[in-house]
Amino acid sequence: MSTTTTSPTPTQTRARAARRRQGMLMIVLLAIALVAPLFAYPVFLMKVLCFALFACAFNLLLGFAGLLSFGHAAFLATGGYVTGFLLSSYPGLTPELGIVVGTLAAVILGTLFGALAIRRQGIYFAMVTLALAQMMFFFYIQAPFTGGEDGLHGVPRGKLLGLIDLSDNLAMYYVVLAIFVIGFAIIQRTVHSPFGQVLKAIRENEPRAVSLGYNVDAYKLVAFVISAGLAGLAGATKTVVFQLASLTDAHWHMSGEVILMTLVGGVGTLFGPLVGAGLVVSLQTQLAQSPLGNWVSVILGSIFVLCVLSFRSGIVGEIQNMVRKNFK
């Protein structure tokens, strides 16, 4: 009995090579992240990781589902405020429980927002999310548990699992890194799953997806909730790191910043938001310490315009395009 084997097509070969390159890149980046505290300030690195997770969560919605949200700051702030309130009010509560509850609060809020917002498309969807986020902003100003304009200060880091003292910045860094890796893995698995393929189909041609029998609204809602939950996870983690939850995270400026991070890095790419977040946070930190501190927004806006005009696919997107051309 003879067996026949079929050789892989050129497309399959390129896809496998791309997956191998992506896997190697992930290993290299993880190795760099593990030793990064030896060369850079851990608190700065934690800030980059928190905003990178926030940007990756936003990119899941915009880059793979084609939904532009102007209200993602609401989920970042919700995760932060809920976690900060719980850890401040209940000293015996461990930080991991506070982060989990803060993330669940963002998931619930994302479900409510998503159920309303997905009824509209395009700019109308964006405006609905912005309006809902502004409602949350004014709620957080008035709510007694948020501290109003003063914010929540002195949130205790506590001990992870009651054992690891997170007041040590190095220990806190590796916890934040683990949280980021988990969040990034969820996004990667979502994107490469059949669910993710349907999201891409909806992004490319929604009427065609409807004609194929997919419940488009249900897919959009699930994507919105996953994105909101991960944004809440980033906000909850950020609150524990800086021991602070403030209105800055709820302001519409924060929603604009995450759009900037995603577009500069490369919308629709896995690593683009990570690069964009690192670039924006680094520039903000450096410029704030320079004589140009009052011009941070202007400089960031100029960089955004230049990147959009010169790198329409973002930094990572342009690099990927060059790699594809060289490996054809």
Image (cartoon, rainbow, N blue to C red):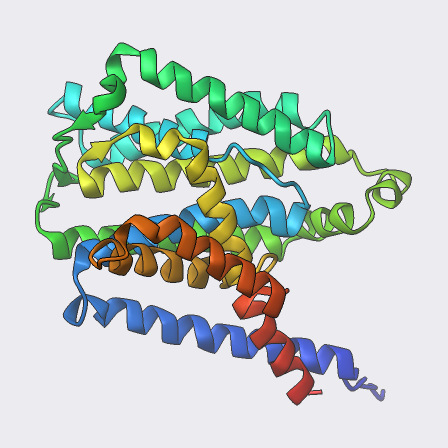
Q: Does residue 77 sit above or below 270 in this rendering?
A: above
Quarter of the image holding residue 232?
top left
Residue 292's quadrant in the figure?
bottom left
Q: Is residue 178 visible?
A: no
**Relative image position of residue 257 (x, y in whole percent):** 45, 46
Left or right: 298 as drawn, with respect to 118: left
Where is residue 265? Give x, y as percent.
Answer: 50, 62
Q: Position of residue 135 (x, y in %)?
A: 48, 17
- Judge whether residue 38 can be spotted in this image: yes
The C terminus - image quarter: bottom right
Task: Report whether 183 appears left or right of 111.
Answer: left
Q: Residue at x 55, y 50 (%)?
A: 59
Up-down: is 192 above or below 78? below
Can you give x and y, in whole percent of width and height, for residue 118 in the image? 68, 28
| In this view, 179 is above or below 111 | below
User: Between residues 296 and 159, which one lies in front from this camera angle?
Assistant: 296
